[in-house]
Image (cartoon, rainbow, N blue to C red):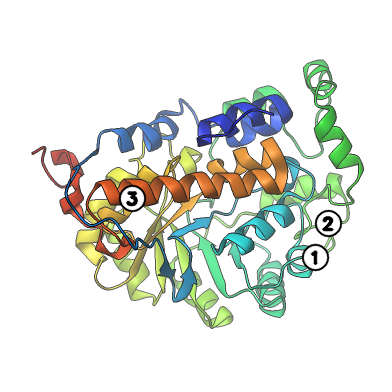
Amino acid sequence: MPVITCIDDLKQLARRRVPRMFFDYCESGSWTEQTFRENTTDFDQIRLRQRVAVDMTERSTASKMIGQEVSMPVALAPVGSTGMQAADGEIKAAKAAEAFGVPFTLSTMSICSIEDVAANTSKPFWFQLYVMRDRKFTGRAIERARAAGCSALMLTLDLQILGQRHKDLKNGLTVPLRPTLGNIANLATKWRWIAGMAGTKHRTFGNVVGHTDGVSDLASLATWAAESFDPKLDWERVKEIKKMWDGPLILKGILDAEDAKMALNVGADAIVVSNHGGRQLDGALSSIRALPAIMDAVGDKIEVHLDSGIRSGQDVLKALALGARGTYIGRAFIYGLGARGQQGVTRALEVIHKEIDITMALCGRRRVDQLDRDVLLVPEDFGGRWQ
């Protein structure tokens, strides 16, 4: 059994164990993948200030995200089709997050349903909502999330239409799956994955099939999904959904200061600076590069979180030091899930937690709420200058 010391170790193990079409589904961006790449490489441009002869005892990474106590300011991001990375993937990830003391966010396009996850966890999780043309479906999803005890609703704003991801097209990742010779040959080598899928009943989109009119199987789901994301979503619709939910509302997909101000005006409780992991508008700014301007515009008026590109605890620390109150990992926990199931998600969280803790100490801080721009050396186009 290989020793896991970093997120990349989990990535390499997941690459060997997860069918190519599903690994590539997460490990890809739209078009040329420029934004997908820069989400991670832009973190590398930010340097850390090492401090010495500072008391490093009694450190704590504990914090709060939208009023919820967390063991570190890191949540598991909503990832579609998580249950295709490993059998019952959403349940396994939610259980790992609960045990670690961090939030788990369930995607609308999950394999395991809201009810499946609620039945296998003991604490509230968050639910991410896509706005569909079918208003009955949206209303039902909100009611189901409320009935399941979800403690926050995350509304994704940047997927009114789908960005094109070349790897998915080349791999034949469709609903239902297109059985190409290449896919069949690759699947034949993934015996662990096959065994897991053979032992679960969760193999379709549990939040959709049986919960919307005219969708009862994968064939009808394909037609529904192709036509369902609502291109008319606007700020008035956001206000309507906030009123329907009447609880903590997080708006995800903010990348511009003007949109951050609009989110503030509609009464959101938090915003997530995110470009959908580079999977929508290729050529958009990386999330970490966009963060300083958004913080300058609204940072003291609304809770700002950051998603997209985080692969280490040092990335988390850099986002916090630039003003974010919380962060999200998507691919990082997906690698763990694909590599070792629930245990792998736990290991991903352990790795990131340790990296936050040690880096924070070597920067001369003992608590995450003490992190500020003074611990960073930031290039001019990130809102600062090299020192």
- Crowding at dot 2, Cα within 10 Å, few <14 / some 14-19 / many 20+, comes out as some
Up the image or down, 349 lies above or below 128; here it is above
Q: Nearer the viewer, residue 354 or 58?
A: 58
Local secondary structure at mark 3: helix
Please count the marks in the image.
3
The mark nearer the N terminus, 2 or 3, is: 2
Up the image or down, 45 lies above or below 288; here it is above
Residue placed under numbered mark 3 in the picture: 317
Examine the rendering and report whether any part of residue 44 can be seen. yes
Local secondary structure at mark 2: loop
Image side of residue 353 versus residue 131, left or right: left
Determine the CA span between mark 1 and mark 2: 8 Å
Q: Which residue is pictured at 28% across the width and 43% down the height?
A: 289
Residue 211's tag is 1
Local secondary structure at mark 1: loop
Residue placed under numbered mark 2 in the picture: 215
Place of residue 15 in the rendered image (x, y in percent of width and height, measured from the top left): 65, 27
| Quarter containing the N terminus | top right
Q: Which residue is pictured at 23% across the width and 48% down the height?
A: 363
- Crowding at dot 1, Cα within 10 Å, few <14 / some 14-19 / many 20+, comes out as some
Question: Mark 2 against mark 3, which lies toward the viewer?
Answer: 3
Determine the CA span between mark 2 and mark 3: 43 Å
Place of residue 118 in the rendered image (x, y in percent of width and height, measured from the top left): 74, 69
Residue 251's tag is none
Q: Nearer the viewer, residue 300 or 329?
A: 329
The mark nearer the N terminus, 1 or 3, is: 1
User: Which quadrant of the figure has residue 325?
Assistant: bottom left
Query: Is there CB contact under 8 Å for labels 1 and 2?
Result: yes
